[in-house]
Image (cartoon, rainbow, N blue to C red):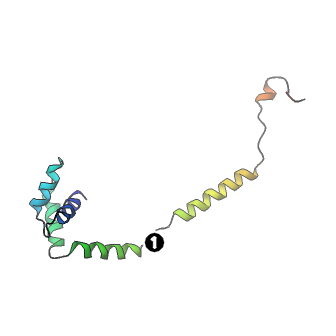
Amino acid sequence: MKSLAAYMLCVLGGNAAPSAKDMAAVLSAVGIDADAAQADLIVSELAGKDLEEVIAAGAEKLATVPTGGAAPAAAGAAAATEEAAEEPAEESESDSDMGFDLFG
């Protein structure tokens, strides 16, 4: 991810085709050692491609991925809250342990 972020920063900075050396310079500026194998892979995979088109294509693919979880979890929490509200509150036995009843 660091190498990909460095590649994207190079592109945003005006370098349409960053090299692994350009990416290493960006990472070293913030004190991170670059992974040469990762940088070479990213450069080879994105060579000749428009980064904005690659991102748009990825966003389209992600739009079709089902991402459930939030609604069922919220429904489960609501059901648990309803169950807790329906149960009568148990009387505290701390008053009876003291040997007297305040209201009786």
**Residue 89 lies in quadrant:** top right
Name the residue nearer the viewer: 73 or 7.
Answer: 7
**x, y percentage for residue 104?**
90, 29
Element under label 1? loop
Residue extending farthest to the right is: 104
Query: Which residue is at a point 76% across and 29% down the rendered structure image?
Result: 94
- Left or right, residue 25 beside residue 84: left
71 sits left or right of 84 in the view: left
Q: Is residue 72 above or below residue 90?
A: below
Residue that label 1 marks: 66
The answer, for residue 33, to whether it is visible in the render is no
Q: Position of residue 97 (x, y in %)?
A: 79, 26
Q: Amino acid at mark 1?
A: Pro
Name the quadrant containing residue 102: top right
Name the one closer to the observer, 27 or 45: 27
What residue is rendered at 13% in x and 64% in y?
40
Residue 7 appearing in the image: yes
Give x and y (percent) for residue 19.
Answer: 10, 64
Outermost residue on the top side: it is: 99
In x, y percent, where is residue 81?
A: 67, 53
**Residue that appears at 23% across and 60% down:** 5
